[in-house]
Amino acid sequence: MQLRSVSRTYGSGDTVVTALDGVTLGFPTGSFTAVMGPSGSGKSTLLQCAAGLDRPTSGSVLLGGTDLTGLSGTRLTLLRRQRIGFVFQSFNLLPSLTAEQNVALPLRLSGRRPAKGAVRDALARVGLADRARHRPSELSGGQQQRVALARALITEPEVLFGDEPTGALDSAAGRRVLSVLRGMADEDGRTVVMVTHDPVAASFADRVLFLADGRLSGELRAPTAESVAAGMARLEAVSC
Ligand SMILES: Nc1ncnc2c1ncn2[C@@H]1O[C@H](COP(=O)(O)OP(=O)(O)OP(=O)(O)O)[C@@H](O)[C@H]1O
C-alpha cells in the first residue's frame, strides 16, 4: 500500500487545520508498521485516509493498483469490506451478539454465508475457540479485542489497521493482541499498520514511523522499547 503526497485539511480560511501535510510513504506487503507521534500530529488522520474511512484533501492512496481516492462512495465501501480490516481501541463489538455472531457479521453484511468452520477457525486463531457462545459482557477486555481481531480476519484483508488496539488493555492482554497482529504479518503475509502511544507495543513492529505536525519526521527499523521511547522523547522535546 502506498500514500503519495497525501494532505488532509479541516475547516477553511482563518480556522484551517492541516492534519496531514504531503505525506508520502509505503507499507510493504507483509510488513508491520507502528505509527507514533505527539497528540494532534495526524496519526489517526493518516490511518483513516489510508483505510478509506476518510478522504484526503489531495494526494493519492494506492492499494495494489487501485487508487482509493478515485472511487465512488459505494465502491470505496465495497473495497473496504473486501480488502481492509480495522480494529479500534474500543473494540466496537455488538453487545447483543455472541463472539461467533460478531465474527460472522462482516461476511453477513456483504451477503456471504460464512463457510462451515471459518468462524470457529478465526476464533481459534486468536485463542478463543472455547468462548464462541459468550457475549462481549462475558469476556475480558483483551478477549473482546481478540474477538474484534477474529472479526477483522474473517474477510482475509490485505491490510489491517489498528488505532491504538492495545490502548485499553493491561500489558499481558496487550501482548496477546500484539502477538496475533505479528502473526498476521509473518504467517499470513498481511500488511499491518498500528497507531500506538506505547513504546512496548511499537517494538512488536518491523519499523516505527514518527509523525510531527502532519509530516513524517523519522523512521526506526527493528525497534526496541528503549529506542522507540528515546525517539518519542526527542520528538516531544522538539515540539515543546
Ligand atoms: N474532524 C476534525 N475537524 C477539525 N480538526 C480536526 C478533525 N479531526 C482532526 N482534526 C485536527 O487535526 C489534527 C490531527 O488530528 P489527529 O486526530 O489525526 O491526531 P492524532 O495524532 O491521532 O492525535 P491523538 O494522539 O491525540 O489521538 C489535530 O490538530 C486535530 O485537532
Image (cartoon, rainbow, N blue to C red):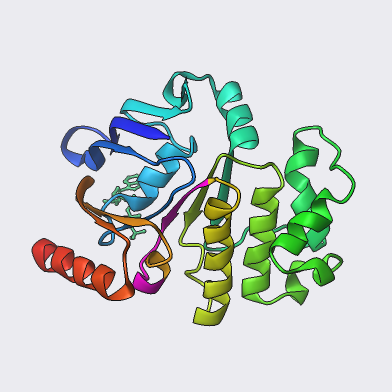
Provide the residue span drawn in magenta.
191-200
Q: Between 105 and 66, which is closer to the camera in this rendering?
A: 66
Q: Position of residue 111 (x, y in %)?
A: 81, 32
Q: Between 240 and 112, which is closer to the camera in this rendering?
A: 112
Q: Between 60 and 207, which is closer to the camera in this rendering?
A: 207
Q: Position of residue 119 (x, y in %)?
A: 81, 52
Q: Is residue 10 visible?
A: no
Q: Is residue 143 left or right of residue 120?
A: left
Please tell me whether residue 233 is drawn above or below residue 147 in the rendered image: below
Residue at 36% over, 44% down: 46
Residue at 69% over, 42% down: 155
Please tell me whether residue 1 is drawn above or below residue 184 in the rendered image: above
Q: Position of residue 224 (x, y in %)?
A: 32, 70
Q: Is residue 152 left or right of residue 33?
A: right
Quarter occupied by residue 139: bottom right
Q: Position of residue 45 (x, y in %)?
A: 37, 45
Asked if residue 87 is among those painted magenta in the image, a careful observer would answer: no
Residue at 63% over, 28% down: 78
